[in-house]
Image (spheres, grey):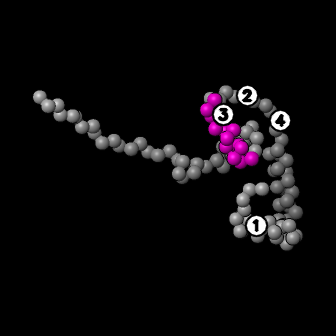
Amino acid sequence: MPNLDEDELEILRAYEQGKLHSVATQGELAELRAAARATGIKDRRVNIRLSSGDLSDIQVKALEEGVPYQTLIASVLHKYVTGRLAERPERAAKPPQKRAPKRRSRSAG
């Protein structure tokens, strides 16, 4: 189990003690179940070429997340096509920085 902070431990204890109850209506639950079933259906297979470096990075990230790398790839693609993939501000592309002009070296002559 990953390291949990105090708030997460409190939630886990409440869940284990049966103190948490759903606030969703039966209609909402039915919609969520239908969406989960539709999302879980993987009826197509694709083959893609990736650079060795990208694949290695994906596999490392998948290990960190505790999921198979194929599942991570499918999740990222799903989030992208549904418009839910967002860049983190610290990883967003930075505008090119202006460089100071190079100084000519003076030759003793």
Marks 4 and 2 in Cβ contact (< 8 Å): no
Point out the frontmost of discs 1 and 2: 1
Position of residue 77 in the picture relative to residue 13 (left or right): left
Structural distance between the alpha carbons of marks 1 and 4: 38 Å
| Residue drawn at 75 percent across, 37 percent down | 70
Percent x, y of residue 34: 85, 51
Position of residue 84 in the picture relative to residue 91 (left or right): right
Question: Which residue has dot 3 on it?
Answer: 55
**38 vs 67, nearest the viewer:** 67
Please tell me whether mark 2 sits on a helix, a strand or a loop.
Answer: loop
Question: Which residue has dot 2 on it?
Answer: 47
Q: Looking at numbered disc 1 in the image, what kind of residue is underneath it?
A: Leu
> Does 84 appear above or below 49?
below
Q: Which residues are magenta?
A: 52-66
Structural distance between the alpha carbons of marks 1 and 3: 35 Å
Q: Looking at numbered disc 3 in the image, what kind of residue is underneath it?
A: Leu
Structural distance between the alpha carbons of marks 4 and 2: 14 Å
Please tell me whether mark 3 sits on a helix, a strand or a loop.
Answer: helix
Residue 31 seen in render: yes
Question: Which residue has dot 1 on it?
Answer: 9
> Does 41 appear above or below 88?
above
| Residue drawn at 28 percent across, 39 percent down | 101
Is 72 a magenta residue? Answer: no
Disc assigned to residue 43: 4
